[in-house]
Image (cartoon, rainbow, N blue to C red):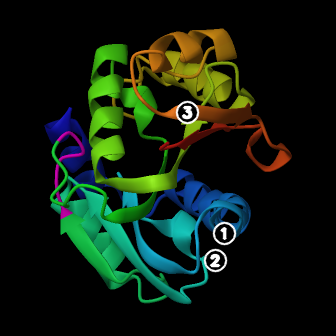
Amino acid sequence: MKEDWDDYWKNSKITFFGKTLSLVRKQIIANRVASIFETYFPKQGKFIDCGCGSAETMIKIKRYNREIIALDYSEHALEKVRNNKSLPVSSTVKADIFDLPFKDNSIGGIWNLGVMEHFSPSEINKILDEFYRVLKKDSYCILLWPSIYGPTNIIFSILGFILRKQFFPNEPSLFRSKSWLKKILKNNKFKLVKITWPITGALIYHEVILRKI
Protein backbone atom coordinates (compact mmCIF):
# COMPACT_ATOMS: atom_id res chain seq x y z
CA MET A 1 0.00 0.00 0.00
CA LYS A 2 2.68 2.52 1.00
CA GLU A 3 4.81 1.70 -2.02
CA ASP A 4 1.74 1.94 -4.28
CA TRP A 5 1.07 5.51 -3.19
CA ASP A 6 4.69 6.57 -3.42
CA ASP A 7 4.78 5.20 -6.97
CA TYR A 8 1.46 6.91 -7.74
CA TRP A 9 2.76 10.36 -6.79
CA LYS A 10 6.20 9.74 -8.23
CA ASN A 11 4.74 8.83 -11.61
CA SER A 12 1.93 11.36 -11.68
CA LYS A 13 2.31 13.52 -14.77
CA ILE A 14 0.68 16.59 -16.23
CA THR A 15 -1.87 14.83 -18.44
CA PHE A 16 -5.42 15.73 -19.40
CA PHE A 17 -6.61 13.30 -16.70
CA GLY A 18 -4.31 14.88 -14.11
CA LYS A 19 -5.29 18.42 -15.04
CA THR A 20 -8.98 17.52 -14.79
CA LEU A 21 -8.55 16.03 -11.31
CA SER A 22 -6.55 19.06 -10.23
CA LEU A 23 -9.27 21.42 -11.50
CA VAL A 24 -11.97 19.50 -9.60
CA ARG A 25 -9.91 19.56 -6.41
CA LYS A 26 -9.19 23.30 -6.56
CA GLN A 27 -12.44 24.67 -7.98
CA ILE A 28 -15.10 22.39 -6.49
CA ILE A 29 -13.93 20.26 -3.57
CA ALA A 30 -11.76 23.05 -2.11
CA ASN A 31 -14.85 25.18 -1.51
CA ARG A 32 -16.42 22.45 0.58
CA VAL A 33 -13.22 21.78 2.53
CA ALA A 34 -12.98 25.49 3.38
CA SER A 35 -16.62 25.45 4.53
CA ILE A 36 -15.96 22.40 6.72
CA PHE A 37 -13.06 24.20 8.35
CA GLU A 38 -15.19 27.20 9.27
CA THR A 39 -17.97 24.95 10.62
CA TYR A 40 -16.04 22.44 12.70
CA PHE A 41 -12.52 23.75 13.35
CA PRO A 42 -11.66 26.78 15.54
CA LYS A 43 -9.58 29.64 14.17
CA GLN A 44 -6.54 28.67 16.19
CA GLY A 45 -4.85 25.39 16.99
CA LYS A 46 -3.12 22.57 15.17
CA PHE A 47 -4.92 20.74 12.34
CA ILE A 48 -3.79 17.83 10.17
CA ASP A 49 -4.70 16.60 6.72
CA CYS A 50 -3.88 12.93 7.34
CA GLY A 51 -3.06 11.57 3.89
CA CYS A 52 -2.81 14.91 2.12
CA GLY A 53 -1.53 13.82 -1.30
CA SER A 54 -1.10 17.00 -3.36
CA ALA A 55 -3.18 18.95 -0.75
CA GLU A 56 -4.85 20.96 -3.53
CA THR A 57 -8.21 20.77 -1.74
CA MET A 58 -6.70 22.99 1.00
CA ILE A 59 -6.21 25.93 -1.33
CA LYS A 60 -9.22 27.97 -0.11
CA ILE A 61 -8.76 27.39 3.62
CA LYS A 62 -8.17 30.57 5.64
CA ARG A 63 -5.18 30.33 7.95
CA TYR A 64 -6.10 32.74 10.76
CA ASN A 65 -3.99 31.47 13.71
CA ARG A 66 -4.17 27.85 12.60
CA GLU A 67 -1.17 25.61 12.21
CA ILE A 68 -2.12 23.50 9.22
CA ILE A 69 -0.06 20.34 8.72
CA ALA A 70 0.09 18.32 5.51
CA LEU A 71 0.87 14.71 6.46
CA ASP A 72 1.55 11.88 4.07
CA TYR A 73 3.71 8.78 3.82
CA SER A 74 4.86 9.67 0.30
CA GLU A 75 7.81 12.04 0.04
CA HIS A 76 6.85 12.63 -3.61
CA ALA A 77 3.42 13.88 -2.53
CA LEU A 78 4.92 16.14 0.13
CA GLU A 79 7.34 17.57 -2.41
CA LYS A 80 4.35 18.64 -4.52
CA VAL A 81 2.87 20.33 -1.44
CA ARG A 82 6.09 22.21 -0.68
CA ASN A 83 6.36 23.40 -4.27
CA ASN A 84 2.81 24.82 -4.24
CA LYS A 85 3.22 28.19 -2.55
CA SER A 86 -0.49 29.00 -2.79
CA LEU A 87 -1.40 26.42 -0.15
CA PRO A 88 -2.07 27.54 3.46
CA VAL A 89 0.27 24.86 4.81
CA SER A 90 2.39 25.60 7.87
CA SER A 91 4.49 22.45 7.62
CA THR A 92 4.72 19.01 6.03
CA VAL A 93 5.22 15.77 7.94
CA LYS A 94 6.20 12.42 6.50
CA ALA A 95 4.51 9.82 8.68
CA ASP A 96 2.33 6.73 8.79
CA ILE A 97 -1.28 7.41 9.82
CA PHE A 98 -1.15 4.24 11.95
CA ASP A 99 1.55 5.91 14.07
CA LEU A 100 1.22 9.69 14.18
CA PRO A 101 4.19 11.64 15.61
CA PHE A 102 2.05 13.81 17.89
CA LYS A 103 1.33 13.84 21.61
CA ASP A 104 -1.95 12.63 23.09
CA ASN A 105 -4.73 15.26 23.11
CA SER A 106 -2.65 17.79 21.15
CA ILE A 107 -4.52 18.24 17.84
CA GLY A 108 -7.51 20.53 17.25
CA GLY A 109 -8.86 18.71 14.21
CA ILE A 110 -8.15 16.02 11.64
CA TRP A 111 -9.51 15.56 8.14
CA ASN A 112 -8.77 13.74 4.92
CA LEU A 113 -10.28 13.06 1.52
CA GLY A 114 -9.97 9.89 -0.50
CA VAL A 115 -7.95 8.02 2.12
CA MET A 116 -10.07 5.70 4.25
CA GLU A 117 -11.41 3.65 1.34
CA HIS A 118 -7.92 2.27 0.70
CA PHE A 119 -7.90 0.31 3.97
CA SER A 120 -9.71 -2.75 5.32
CA PRO A 121 -12.29 -2.31 8.12
CA SER A 122 -9.82 -3.56 10.75
CA GLU A 123 -7.17 -1.13 9.48
CA ILE A 124 -9.71 1.70 9.49
CA ASN A 125 -10.37 1.12 13.18
CA LYS A 126 -6.65 1.16 13.96
CA ILE A 127 -6.33 4.46 12.11
CA LEU A 128 -9.31 5.92 13.95
CA ASP A 129 -7.84 4.81 17.28
CA GLU A 130 -4.72 6.78 16.42
CA PHE A 131 -6.76 9.82 15.36
CA TYR A 132 -8.69 9.60 18.64
CA ARG A 133 -5.46 9.46 20.64
CA VAL A 134 -3.98 12.68 19.27
CA LEU A 135 -7.21 14.72 19.09
CA LYS A 136 -8.25 17.02 21.90
CA LYS A 137 -11.55 16.35 23.65
CA ASP A 138 -14.58 17.69 21.74
CA SER A 139 -12.53 18.01 18.55
CA TYR A 140 -13.68 16.73 15.17
CA CYS A 141 -12.42 14.20 12.67
CA ILE A 142 -13.86 14.82 9.20
CA LEU A 143 -13.59 12.04 6.62
CA LEU A 144 -14.53 12.77 3.02
CA TRP A 145 -15.15 9.21 1.92
CA PRO A 146 -15.65 8.28 -1.76
CA SER A 147 -18.78 6.32 -2.58
CA ILE A 148 -18.92 3.04 -4.47
CA TYR A 149 -22.19 4.31 -5.99
CA GLY A 150 -20.87 7.76 -6.94
CA PRO A 151 -20.99 8.54 -10.68
CA THR A 152 -17.26 9.35 -10.67
CA ASN A 153 -16.34 5.94 -9.29
CA ILE A 154 -18.65 4.20 -11.77
CA ILE A 155 -17.04 6.09 -14.67
CA PHE A 156 -13.53 5.21 -13.49
CA SER A 157 -14.56 1.57 -13.07
CA ILE A 158 -15.90 1.40 -16.63
CA LEU A 159 -12.87 3.19 -18.08
CA GLY A 160 -10.53 0.97 -16.08
CA PHE A 161 -12.21 -2.15 -17.45
CA ILE A 162 -12.09 -0.88 -21.04
CA LEU A 163 -8.53 0.44 -20.88
CA ARG A 164 -7.30 -2.32 -18.55
CA LYS A 165 -5.93 0.38 -16.30
CA GLN A 166 -6.06 0.92 -12.54
CA PHE A 167 -6.32 4.65 -11.89
CA PHE A 168 -5.77 4.51 -8.13
CA PRO A 169 -4.35 2.03 -5.59
CA ASN A 170 -6.84 -0.59 -4.32
CA GLU A 171 -10.07 0.67 -2.74
CA PRO A 172 -11.53 -2.20 -0.67
CA SER A 173 -13.66 0.07 1.54
CA LEU A 174 -15.48 2.51 -0.70
CA PHE A 175 -18.53 3.92 1.11
CA ARG A 176 -21.47 1.55 0.68
CA SER A 177 -24.19 2.69 3.09
CA LYS A 178 -24.72 4.30 6.47
CA SER A 179 -25.40 0.92 8.07
CA TRP A 180 -22.19 -0.48 6.55
CA LEU A 181 -20.16 2.39 8.00
CA LYS A 182 -21.86 2.26 11.40
CA LYS A 183 -20.91 -1.40 11.64
CA ILE A 184 -17.27 -0.45 11.16
CA LEU A 185 -17.42 2.50 13.54
CA LYS A 186 -19.03 0.58 16.41
CA ASN A 187 -15.59 -0.68 17.44
CA ASN A 188 -14.07 2.73 18.15
CA LYS A 189 -14.66 5.54 20.65
CA PHE A 190 -15.70 8.36 18.33
CA LYS A 191 -19.22 9.72 18.41
CA LEU A 192 -20.74 9.66 14.94
CA VAL A 193 -22.25 13.12 14.52
CA LYS A 194 -23.64 12.68 11.01
CA ILE A 195 -23.08 11.28 7.54
CA THR A 196 -24.01 13.47 4.58
CA TRP A 197 -23.77 13.36 0.80
CA PRO A 198 -23.48 17.07 -0.07
CA ILE A 199 -24.29 18.51 -3.48
CA THR A 200 -20.65 19.54 -3.95
CA GLY A 201 -19.49 15.98 -3.28
CA ALA A 202 -22.33 13.99 -4.79
CA LEU A 203 -20.21 12.86 -7.71
CA ILE A 204 -17.46 11.62 -5.44
CA TYR A 205 -17.78 11.35 -1.66
CA HIS A 206 -19.82 11.27 1.54
CA GLU A 207 -18.87 13.38 4.54
CA VAL A 208 -18.42 11.47 7.78
CA ILE A 209 -18.34 13.76 10.82
CA LEU A 210 -16.84 12.24 13.98
CA ARG A 211 -16.28 13.85 17.37
CA LYS A 212 -14.04 12.89 20.24
CA ILE A 213 -16.08 12.93 23.45
Query: What residue is disc 2 on?
Result: 60
Residue type at tag 3: Lys
**Which of the two discs, 1 and 2, sits closer to the camera?**
1
Alpha carbon of mark 1 to alpha carbon of mark 2: how far? 6 Å
The answer to whether residue 8 is above or below residue 23 is above
Q: Which of 102 and 13 is in front in this view?
A: 102
Could you say which quadrant of the image residue 123 lies in?
Answer: top left
Query: What residue is disc 1 on?
Result: 34
Residue type at tag 2: Lys
Q: In which quarter of the image is the N terminus?
A: top left
Per the image, label 3 sits on a secondary structure element best described as strand
Task: Say whether residue 167 is visible.
Answer: no
In the image: residue 19, left or right of residue 132 = right
Query: What residue is disc 3 on?
Result: 191
Alpha carbon of mark 3 to alpha carbon of mark 2: how far? 28 Å
Per the image, label 1 sits on a secondary structure element best described as helix
**Which of the two discs, 3 and 1, sits closer to the camera?**
3
**Rendering coords of residue 157 (x, y %):** 56, 21
**Rendering coords of residue 39 (x, y %):** 71, 63
Q: Nearer the viewer, residue 83 or 175?
A: 175
Residue 97 among magenta residues? yes
Q: What stretch is highlighted in magenta?
A: 94-98
- Which sits earlier in the primary sequence, circle 3 or circle 2? 2
In the image: residue 213, left or right of residue 53 = right
Could you say which quadrant of the image residue 209 lies in?
Answer: top right
| Discs 1, 2 touching: Cβ within 8 Å | yes
- Which sits earlier in the primary sequence, circle 1 or circle 2? 1
Per the image, label 2 sits on a secondary structure element best described as loop
